[in-house]
Structure formats: structure tokens, C-alpha cells
């Protein structure tokens, strides 16, 4: 037990009366009453395991005064919570918090366990990469201010997430890291300049006093490098040793501070060689590697923050005949807002006046503007490019699609795939192996050639630093996820990329997935003497009184004025004009209302057919169709050429399904499929060894979206379907599926390459270093070079472009799937 350091924060104890508290029956010393209070809270909550798990010093807590409590209480007001808190469908509240003071995984464990014990808190998950927490709580049982105070009681500071504040914090941290790197880099150059003549024998015949002057100058130069630039490594290593936990900071600190202390001793007492230049170079390159990792975390968080930054701060609110500029966070459903060309949309809504082209690239990755007109929905964060628009607000603040994507992205970044977990475990064992190798090396050379023992051991510690191994997986995943989001494919789970790389079979829903999900008028066949234009006007006049999907096919047509309109749901519509009755709907319904016999047989082409008639006369047969998505054929053709098995499973009846299947390169198609049937189909495919991905959009797809190996919700899918899916398509096209299925195997290969390169580098250089063939300064260069190679290799994923289709052998058995198999 060290009575010179604070038990909680590890700062040196100040002079004066000791502050002592009993922990596990032993007296523990604290630097201040704040640390003692926080420690008491941790112990009283039964969370003392925190002190064994943490791997870095804890920040000294600040006292909680009345002003702090009053400041937190402000967050309970509705006006402040509006833009910060998401009201979930289950009645719970959700928000994101920025958490300051996180130093290691144990800090996250402590906060999560402490808050989970607070009444009313349903869940809390903290993302160490972005330093953000996602909290869900029950309104009425606990307030947001109480959650913030509960975190403050542990010595951490939390506040509702604001992209601008988060960016400022990250930029400040990067600036500080760059300062440390700059000092280390400057020290490395100066120390190398002084070491060069000593290392290469250029001082032969020179007065010993000059050599000693060079050594003292090198010591002076290395001191700020070690005591400032390398101090974070030492602080983390001391904490690791106190809690008997090995991380890469332990061998790193042994190399840096061991080399510094040994060189200082040789300078004072006399000896053959000093290592100040190696210490400076190692610190510089190691700091550079950590900075690259920090940049990766920053970019991962920036991918989400940039979405929220797309939200404008103000909105043009229409109040009667006047327009007022108001904060966008004050908008609520039902408000009417105006958009001028160049304005960003501040909320999700429906266009009620005007038509314009909107830039939706922030959400969909599609860079061509999309024309939107009256009655169509627009999303917050998109940009009005051409003409004025008037919009009715449907969702605002945390309820917009943009905010939902942000939450999904943050959730995906919190989850680690098996590859990343395995790499972390390998890194932990690798540290122990490095320390063992260094011990064996020192003992061996102490017997063979004592004068070289320390230098060779130092080279072993430096050359085997597992920086590259630690960077191998996260840099690749970050680059791949960012590239996919930019091209319209949003992974919602941390394991999505890993799963995509194994897929061999894709099962598509039909309506709204392969087709647009909107009926359109395919053709009109006159059955009487009435002109086509008049038939269309009558049909539009009747259908304008319905909200059935069929009615949307007539929305853009001129409509005739009808009166006494009656809507029979699921059958048809009747109305009168100029004393005559008209009816539209199914053949049976129209024949009954207009006293007619059966019409001529309709062609069996898979179209949806409805009829228009008046009393005693058939007027027209109208064929409606749900068109394929524009890129459905090209996307499926590319997937087919790449060897994937393609299956369509639809709840529609056989003629409609057969017509769509005839236009696409499908291997199999199934009609009349209930949600349970679709799930059974997927399970039967998986039972045959297939890795299945389901692509769907609606409530009827929920069981199979949740039950498939991997699932993707298309743009326009229901909210609950998006929650069940492993990924989302952000745009109206299916092309991002090809991108994702191309990038996922490449990501897996890059991760394996990175891990292989890291292990191969260490396996090659370790024996050479143990034999004394690699000097410490060269070991520092080799260590940093391996880290840079790993990072650059991962960044290649960000430049991935889908290549031209290449025909390959099928990835699946060509034997048809029998409906008699189990589960079908």
C-alpha cells in the first residue's frame, strides 16, 4: 500500500493533516475530501471492484455546490429538454450525454453500474470512443438533473450532448496531444543530432569533456520529453501495476523511463552508452500512433455529429399572415414553416405548398437533388435547392429521422464484433509475453555480456510494443463504417460488417422492397362509349374520397366533381354527377351497385384490376401496377453474377408475384407468405447451411428481420422494422447492398492483414532484438512504421468503389428448396 498517493485519484498527497478512510478494513489515504466522498459513495454502493478494474488514474473530483445543483435543475424544464430528449414509443425518455473524465474501461463500468441502481433508470450504455452515454429512464421516477448529479457524485462531469461542445472538447484534446508530440519530435531531432557522433565513432580522439557535454545536453533535452510527453504512459502504467493489471502501457513505460533513468545514471557515474535519443524517438512515435487512434475515434464520432450539425439553428415560422424567425428547437408538430432556396429543413414534415429540388445527400448518400412536391415528406437536415416551399411540421427535435439515425449510429459503434474482442484478448496476452521475453533477454545477456544487457532489453521492449495490434481492428471498422454511411448503407449493429462477409443468400420482400410500394395506373381499357379522358376524370373524382393505396394512383389526375360519395372499405366507391350514379372498385361490387352482369374476362397479367361503371353500362377496366424500383434489375443482376442466391418471399397472391419474378433474375419466388412462413423459409435455408440476409420494409417482415442471420430495412420502412434490422438503406435505391456486400469481405481481409502484419512484424523483429541486432533507436522507428502501415492499410477501405460485375461460381447449391422441408 502506497501512502504517498491518493487512493482514489493517485495524485501525490499534500502536506498537512492526513485524510483517511477505512476501505476493506484497511486505512486508505486521500488527497482531499472530494476524493474521500467519491470513494465512500463507490464503496457504499458495493462497487469497490472499480479499484481493481481501472487501468488509468481517476480525475480528482470537484465539490458539488448549490450553484452546480441549480445548474443541473435547469435541464428538467420542458424548454431545455425539447431538443435534447427523445420521447420513445414505450413512454420512456432517452438522451445522449457527454461524459468528461473517462480514463479507462473501469470508469465506464463504474458509471453504468451506479446508474443502473438508480430508481427509474432503465439502461445506460457508454461509448468510450466518443465519450458519450445513451441513457433511458422513466419519467416521473427520476429527473434528468438527478441522473447528472448521480454521475457527478462519482467524480465525473456529464452534460447533454451538443455536437459543437463535443467537437471543441475533442479538438482541445487533439491540440494537447499534438503539443506532446511536437515536444517529443523536437527533442528526438536534437537528441539524435547529439547522439550521431557518439554512435558512429566520430568523437574518437576527442576530449572526454566534450563527450560528457553531449550527454548532459541530451539529458537536458530528453527531460521535458519524458516528464511531459511520456507522462500519460507512466500514469497509466502505475495504475496498472497497483491493480495487478497488464496493458501495453506497462512495457512502454518500462522502456521509456527505464532507458531515461539508466542513461541519467551512466551520464553521472560514467559508462559506455546512453539512450536518450532512443527514449525521445520512442515517445514521439508512440505518441504519434496514439494520436492517429484518437483521430480515428474523433472521425467515428464526427460521422454522427456531422449529421446533427446539418440541423439549422433557426426556422421561418408562419403565424397567420406573418413570418417569424424562431429557434428550430421550439418547433412542434402542426407548425407551418417556410423554406427559401438554400435553407436547410429544420424538422421532418409534409410539403403543403410548392415544389422544389432537395439535396438529401446527408441522409441518403445520393448526390443528385430529388424533386419533392405538395403532399410529399421531407426530412430534417436536407437542403432546399431551388424554389420556396411551405411545410407542415410532423416531427421535430429528437423525433426526426436525422436524430434516429444518429442514435442508431452511436449504438452500432458501442458494439464490438468478435474479431475486435479477439484482438483485444490477444493484445493482453501479448503484453505478458513481451515482459517475459524482456526478462529472459536481460538475464541471458547479463551472463553473456553485461554491458549490452540493458540496451538489448530496451530494444526488445520497444520493438515489440503492440501498438499496431491494438490499432488493427478499430481503424478498419471505422473506415469501413464511414465509407458505407457515405454511400447510403447504415450499419445499426457493431457485428453487421462481420456478418455481411459470410452471406451467400438474399431473401427479398416484394412490395416496398423490390417494388416502389406505390400503385400507379398502368392502363385503361374502355368498355363503353365514354371517352378515356372522361373515364379518368370520373375515376379520379371517386378515388379522391379514399385513402386506400389504390387512390394514390389517381392523385395527379384531373377529377370530376361528384356528390353523395360513399366509400365501402375493401370493395369500392359510389357517387353521383348530373343525376347519374357511378361506381368504381372490384367487378362484383360495381356490378352489384350498377345492376350489371359480369364484365369481359380480365387478362391474367398480374396487374390489379378495378372497374368503372354507371347504371346499366360498363365504362372502363383500369389496370394498376406497383413498379419495380429503378435499380432493382441492375442490382439483382450484379448480385446474381457475383454468385449470390436470390429469393423473393411475398404475401401477395401468385399472379402478382409471378409477374414481378418474371422481370428479375431470381432463383426462387414464394407467394402468399405469412410472416411466420417467411421466417420458416429463412430457417429452412439456414438449416441447409446457407447464411441468409433478409431485406424488407414492413410490419409483416418483423419476425424474419429479427430471426435472420442478418437483416436490412429499406428506406421508408416502418420504425419498428428499422429497430429490428441490422442495417438500413438510407436512399431509395438498392445499389448500396452491392457496396456493402463488396466492402464487408474486404474489411475482414484488411483486419486479418493488419493482425497478420502486426504479429509477423513482432515475430520477425523479436528474435533479432533479443540477439542484439537491432539498436533501440531503430526499434523505435520499426515500431512506429508498423503502426503507420496498419493505419494506412485500413484507410484504403474508405476509398472502396464497387467494381464492375464479375461472374463467379454460385455460392449456393442449385438444388431447388422443397416446400416439404422442415419449417416450410
Image (cartoon, helix red, strand yellow):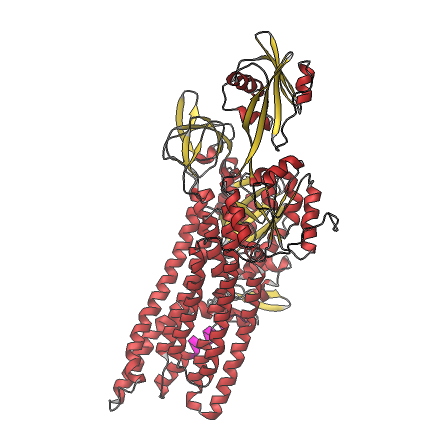
In depth, the one of 342 and 224 nearer the eye is: 342
Is 253 magenta? The answer is: yes
Give the x, y percent position of residue 458: 44, 80
Vertical side of 543 occupied by 790: above or below: below
Give the x, y percent position of residue 73: 52, 42
Vertical side of 164 occupied by 51: above or below: below
Chief SS of the magenta region: helix
Q: Can residue 93 be seen from the camera position used here?
A: yes
Q: Can residue 88 be seen from the camera position used here?
A: no
| Left or right: 788 as drawn, with respect to 751 | left
In depth, the one of 31 and 142 nearer the eye is: 142
Is 192 magenta? The answer is: no
Vertical side of 147 occupied by 278: above or below: below
Vertical side of 340 occupied by 108: above or below: below
Q: Which residues are magenta?
A: 246-258
Q: Residue at x 41, y 51 (%)?
A: 167
Outermost left residue = 206
Q: Quadrant of residue 138?
A: top right
Outermost top residue = 579
In depth, the one of 706 and 444 nearer the eye is: 706
Quadrant into which the N terminus falls: bottom right
Give the x, y percent position of residue 273: 36, 85
In depth, the one of 609 and 563 nearer the eye is: 609
Give the x, y percent position of residue 250: 50, 73
Q: How many marks?
A: 0
Q: Residue at x 39, y 83 (%)?
A: 265
| Left or right: 421 as drawn, with respect to 300 | right
Amino acid at each position: 500500500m502506497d501512502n504517498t498517493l491518493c487512493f482514489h485519484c493517485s495524485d501525490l498527497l499534500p502536506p498537512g493533516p492526513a485524510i483517511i478512510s477505512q476501505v476493506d478494513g484497511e486505512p486508505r489515504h486521500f488527497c482531499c475530501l472530494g476524493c474521500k466522498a467519491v470513494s465512500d459513495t463507490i464503496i457504499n454502493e458495493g462497487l469497490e471492484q472499480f479499484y481493481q478494474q481501472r487501468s488509468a488514474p481517476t480525475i480528482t473530483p470537484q465539490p458539488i455546490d448549490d450553484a452546480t445543483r441549480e445548474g443541473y435543475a435547469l435541464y428538467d424544464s420542458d424548454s431545455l429538454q425539447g431538443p435534447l430528449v427523445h420521447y420513445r414509443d414505450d413512454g420512456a425518455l432517452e438522451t445522449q450525454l457527454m461524459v468528461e473524465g473517462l480514463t479507462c474501461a473501469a470508469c465506464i463500468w463504474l458509471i453504468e453500474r451506479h446508474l443502473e441502481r438508480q430508481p427509474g433508470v432503465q439502461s445506460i450504455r457508454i461509448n468510450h470512443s466518443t465519450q458519450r452515454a445513451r441513457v433511458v429512464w422513466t419519467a416521473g421516477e427520476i429527473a434528468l438533473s438527478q441522473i447528472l448529479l448521480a454521475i457527478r457524485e462519482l467524480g465525473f462531469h456529464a452534460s447533454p450532448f451538443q455536437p459543437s461542445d463535443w467537437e471543441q472538447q475533442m479538438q482541445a484534446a487533439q491540440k494537447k496531444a499534438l503539443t506532446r508530440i511536437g515536444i517529443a519530435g523536437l527533442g528526438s531531432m536534437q537528441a539524435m543530432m547529439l547522439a550521431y557522433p557518439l554512435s558512429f565513432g566520430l568523437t574518437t580522439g576527442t576530449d572526454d569533456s566534450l563527450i560528457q557535454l553531449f550527454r548532459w545536453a541530451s539529458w537536458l533535452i530528453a527531460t521535458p520529453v519524458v516528464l511531459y510527453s511520456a507522462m500519460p504512459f507512466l500514469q497509466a502504467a502505475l495504475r496498472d501495476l497497483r491493480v495487478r493489471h497488464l496493458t501495453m502501457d506497462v512495457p512502454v513505460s518500462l522502456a521509456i523511463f527505464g532507458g531515461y533513468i539508466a542513461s541519467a545514471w551512466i551520464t553521472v557515474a560514467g559508462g559506455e552508452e546512453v539512450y536518450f535519443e532512443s527514449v525521445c524517438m520512442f515517445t514521439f512515435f508512440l505518441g504519434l500512433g496514439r494520436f492517429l487512434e484518437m483521430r480515428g475515434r474523433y472521425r467515428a464520432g464526427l460521422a454522427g455529429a456531422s449529421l446533427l450539425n446539418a440541423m439549422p439553428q433557426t426556422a421561418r415560422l408562419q403565424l397567420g399572415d406573418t413570418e417569424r424567425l424562431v429557434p428550430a428547437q421550439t418547433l412542434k408538430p402542426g407548425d407551418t414553416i417556410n423554406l427559401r432556396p438554400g435553407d436547410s429543413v429544420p424538422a421532418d414534415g409534409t410539403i403543403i405548398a410548392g415544389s422544389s429540388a432537395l439535396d438529401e445527400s446527408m441522409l441518403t448518400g445520393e448526390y443528385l437533388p430529388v424533386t419533392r412536391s405538395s403532399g410529399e415528406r421531407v426530412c430534417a437536415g436536407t437542403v432546399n435547392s431551388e424554389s420556396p416551399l411551405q411545410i407542415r411540421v410532423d416531427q421535430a427535435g429528437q423525433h426526426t429521422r436525422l436524430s434516429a439515425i444518429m442514435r442508431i449510429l452511436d449504438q452500432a459503434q458501442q458494439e464490438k464484433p468478435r474479431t475486435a474482442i479477439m484482438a483485444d484478448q490477444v493484445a493482453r496476452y501479448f503484453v505478458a509475453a513481451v515482459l517475459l521475453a524482456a526478462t529472459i533477454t536481460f538475464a541471458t545477456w547479463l551472463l553473456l555480456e553485461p554491458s549490452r544487457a540493458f540496451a538489448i532489453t530496451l530494444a526488445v521492449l520497444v520493438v515489440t510494443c503492440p501498438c499496431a495490434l491494438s490499432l488493427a481492428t478499430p481503424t478498419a471498422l471505422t473506415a469501413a463504417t464511414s465509407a458505407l454511411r457515405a454511400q447510403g448503407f447504415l450499419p445499426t449493429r457493431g457485428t453487421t460488417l462481420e456478418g455481411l462477409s459470410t452471406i451467400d443468400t438474399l431473401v427479398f420482400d416484394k412490395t416496398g422492397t423490390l417494388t416502389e410500394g406505390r400503385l400507379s395506373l398502368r392502363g385503361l381499357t374502355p368498355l363503353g362509349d365514354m371517352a378515356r379522358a372522361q373515364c379518368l376524370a370520373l375515376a379520379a373524382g371517386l378515388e379522391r374520397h379514399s385513402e386506400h393505396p389504390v387512390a394514390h394512383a389517381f392523385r395527379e389526375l384531373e377529377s370530376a366533381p361528384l356528390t353523395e360519395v360513399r366509400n365501402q372499405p375493401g370493395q369500392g366507391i359510389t357517387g353521383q354527377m348530373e343525376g347519374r350514379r357511378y361506381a368504381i372498385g372490384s367487378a362484383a361490387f360495381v356490378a352489384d351497385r350498377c345492376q350489371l352482369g359480369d364484365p369481359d374476362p380480365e387478362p391474367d397479367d398480374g396487374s390489379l384490376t378495378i372497374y368503372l361503371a354507371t347504371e346499366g353500362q360498363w365504362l372502363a377496366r383500369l389496370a394498376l401496377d406497383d413498379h419495380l424500383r429503378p435499380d432493382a434489375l441492375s442490382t439483382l443482376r450484379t448480385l446474381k453474377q457475383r454468385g449470390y442466391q436470390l429469393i423473393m418471399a411475398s404475401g401477395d397472391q401468385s399472379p402478382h408475384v409471378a409477374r414481378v419474378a418474371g422481370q428479375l433474375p431470381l432463383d426462387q419466388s414464394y407467394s402468399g407468405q405469412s410472416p411466420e412462413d417467411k421466417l420458416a423459409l429463412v430457417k429452412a435455408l439456414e438449416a441447409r447451411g446457407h447464411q441468409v440476409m433478409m431485406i424488407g420494409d414492413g410490419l409483416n417482415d418483423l419476425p424474419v428481420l429479427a430471426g435472420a442471420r442478418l437483416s436490412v430495412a429499406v428506406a421508408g420502412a416502418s420504425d419498428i422494422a428499422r429497430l429490428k434490422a441490422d442495417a438500413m438503406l438510407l436512399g431509395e435505391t438498392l445499389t448500396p447492398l452491392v457496396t456493402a456486400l463488396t466492402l464487408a469481405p474486404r474489411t475482414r481481409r484488411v483486419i486479418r492483414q493488419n493482425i497478420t502484419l502486426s504479429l509477423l512484424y513482432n515475430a520477425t523483429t523479436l528474435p533479432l532484438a533479443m540477439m542484439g541486432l537491432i539498436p533501440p533507436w531503430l526499434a523505435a522507428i520499426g515500431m512506429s512504421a508498423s503502426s503507420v502501415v496498419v493505419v494506412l492499410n485500413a484507410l484504403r477501405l474508405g476509398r472502396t468503389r464497387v467494381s464492375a460485375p464479375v461472374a463467379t461460381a454460385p455460392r449456393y447449391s442449385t438444388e431447388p428448396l422443397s416446400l416439404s422441408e422442415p419449417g416450410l
